[in-house]
Image: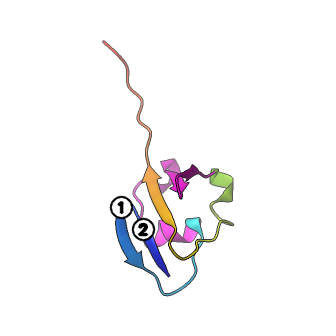
Amino acid sequence: MNLTVAGSKKTYDEELTIAELIKVEDVENAEYVTVTLNDEFLERADFETTKLSEGDIVEFLYFMGGGAR
């Protein structure tokens, strides 16, 4: 299966869910990551059940807080 993950084209031997992809890609701070699939934000509750398909585009995002001085 060919996917674009974090801007890089990658090939995987088997069908994966978002949760499995997070593990395979060894995503840093996985408990805080937000995921988009084909430019749509996913709910964390759906990571285990959302299966990836040929050509999908997955991005891992982290939102950082900050303030003005």
Q: Is residue 20 magenta?
A: yes
Task: Using the image as rendered, state which of residue 18 and residue 41 is in the foreground.
Answer: 41
Residue 62 x %, y %: 43, 45
Does residue 18 sit above or below 61 in this rendering? below
Residue occupying image coordinates x 54% and y 77%:
54
Name the residue carrying label 2: 4
**Quadrant of image for the C terminus:** top left
Residue 39 x %, y %: 52, 52
Give the residues in magenta: 19-42
* Disc 1/disc 2 C-alpha distance (Å): 6 Å
In the figure, is residue 66 to the left or right of 13? left
Q: Is residue 21 magenta?
A: yes
The amino acid beneath tag 1 is: Gly
Residue 9 x %, y %: 37, 72
Name the residue carrying label 1: 7
Task: Using the image as rendered, state which of residue 4 and residue 64 is in the foreground.
Answer: 4
Q: Residue furthest top?
A: 69
Does residue 17 sit above or below 27 in this rendering? below
Tell me the SS state at disc 1: loop
Label 1 crowd bin: few (<14), some (14–19), many (20+), radius 10 Å: few
The amino acid beneath tag 2 is: Thr
Residue occupying image coordinates x 46% and y 82%:
12
Residue 35 x %, y %: 52, 53
